């Protein structure tokens, strides 16, 4: 299976937590006691449905075909104030960057961002109280106990937003996949036609010795992506989690570099204005076909207030300098605001 068929970043599942066990209404009896008091134990809690972050996971594929997640019911209480056993929790491991939402309201319930982080998705029903809780001075032998609380059933949406240090942003065929394949061990599918990349590819980029950073090749944006055109809206959510955004514009674009950058920036701004608070970098790709005179001419029209560089992944031109620029942006103490 290719990475494309393995990558799932959206699933909708029905979660049902366990019902709480019923409390016991038992009255104490033994050889010596024929009219003992209440000693019915509490019912056990129903099982939770729990999400747990796992840094080794990078997709929600394992949940794609599990439409119903059912936790176990709690056990009933018994005599001698013995509590019923807890229902078995249902633990779902998910990649870091997973967001849980209520499918009906769209409300964000929580986010999983750390390895080992656990959050209760649907809590199990509480166990009912046994009859010994209800004994009073006027009611010595209560013959009733609480039933267990029902579990919760709800449809949940899990969305994965890729966590990376730098996200590559550009129109289809801007050279993002080629750059990722050159600077990391990632093996994205590459071809010279638009929309080769249909899923985010992640690569670890080695930097000056033992240091490294994570680069994400986000599928190409098309004009109108922020309005949900094509697959754009799905792809844009992955950009939200990147620390630095590297805009990539090919040197052979039909528009000016500045115009292309402005269109990309507008798409991000309309989707989420907060993306404008992230550091932006600009790489002009496929520049091995340019001579020095043409580069000098194009530099006059580059957007201001944003670090930019001419690179060629194939010819390995400017790659080291680009890594330096990215490293500096990732580790900047104060994220620089981009030009509005």
Image (cartoon, helix red, strand yellow):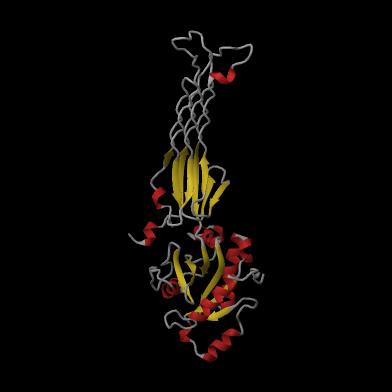
Look at the picture and state if 110 lies above or below 37. Answer: below
Q: Quadrant of residue 306?
A: bottom right
Q: Quadrant of residue 188?
A: bottom left
Identity of the residue drawn at 55% across and 73% down: 327
Pick the quarter of the image with the C terminus.
Answer: bottom right
Residue at the limit of the structure toward the front, as seen here:
32
User: In the image, is 186 to the left or to the right of 293?
Assistant: left
Identity of the residue drawn at 46% across and 71% down: 205
Residue at the limit of the structure toward the top, as seen here:
34
In this view, the residue in front, 239 or 173, is 239
Look at the picture and state if 76 lies above or below 53. Answer: above
Identity of the residue drawn at 50% across and 47% down: 157
Give the percent coordinates (x, y) of residue 114.
52, 55
Pick the quarter of the image with the N terminus.
Answer: bottom left
Give the percent coordinates (x, y) of residue 162.
49, 60
Give the percent coordinates (x, y) of residue 228.
53, 57
Regarding residue 40, the answer to whether it shows in the image is yes
Residue at the limit of the structure toward the left, as seen here:
1
Residue at the limit of the structure toward the bottom, as seen here:
293
In this view, the residue in front, 327 or 142, is 142
Give the percent coordinates (x, y) of residue 80.
48, 20
């Amino acid at each position: 299976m290719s990475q494309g068929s393995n990558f799932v970043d959206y699933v909708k599942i029905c979660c049902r937590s366990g019902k709480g066990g019923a409390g016991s209404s038992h009255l104490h009896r033994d050889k010596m006691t024929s009219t003992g008091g209440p000693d019915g134990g509490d019912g056990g809690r129903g099982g939770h449905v729990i999400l747990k972050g796992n840094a080794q996971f990078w997709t929600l594929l394992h949940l794609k075909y599990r439409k119903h997640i059912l936790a176990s019911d709690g056990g009933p209480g018994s005599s001698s104030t013995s509590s019923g056993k807890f229902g078995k929790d249902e633990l779902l491991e998910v990649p870091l960057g997973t967001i849980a939402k209520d499918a009906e309201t769209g409300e964000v319930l929580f986010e999983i961002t750390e390895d080992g982080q656990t959050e209760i998705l649907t809590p199990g029903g509480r166990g009912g109280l046994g009859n010994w809780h209800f004994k009073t001075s006027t009611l010595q032998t209560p013959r009733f106990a609480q039933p267990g609380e029902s579990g919760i059933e709800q449809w949940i949406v899990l969305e994965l937003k890729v966590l990376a240090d730098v996200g590559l942003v550009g129109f289809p065929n801007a050279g993002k996949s080629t750059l990722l394949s050159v600077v990391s061990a990632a093996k994205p599918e590459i071809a010279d036609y638009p929309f080769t990349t249909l899923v985010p590819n992640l690569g670890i980029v080695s930097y000056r010795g033992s240091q490294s950073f994570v680069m994400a090749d986000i599928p190409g944006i098309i004009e109108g992506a922020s309005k949900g055109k094509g697959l754009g809206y799905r792809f844009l959510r992955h950009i939200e989690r990147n620390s630095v955004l590297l805009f990539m514009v090919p040197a052979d674009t039909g528009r000016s570099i500045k115009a292309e950058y402005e269109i990309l920036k507008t798409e991000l701004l309309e989707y989420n204005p907060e993306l404008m608070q992230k550091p932006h970098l600009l790489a002009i790709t496929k520049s091995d076909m340019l001579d020095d005179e043409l580069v000098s001419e194009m530099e006059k029209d580059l957007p201001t207030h944003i670090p930019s560089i001419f690179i060629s992944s194939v010819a390995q031109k400017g790659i080291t300098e680009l890594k330096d620029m990215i490293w500096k942006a990732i580790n900047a103490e104060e994220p620089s605001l981009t030009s509005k």
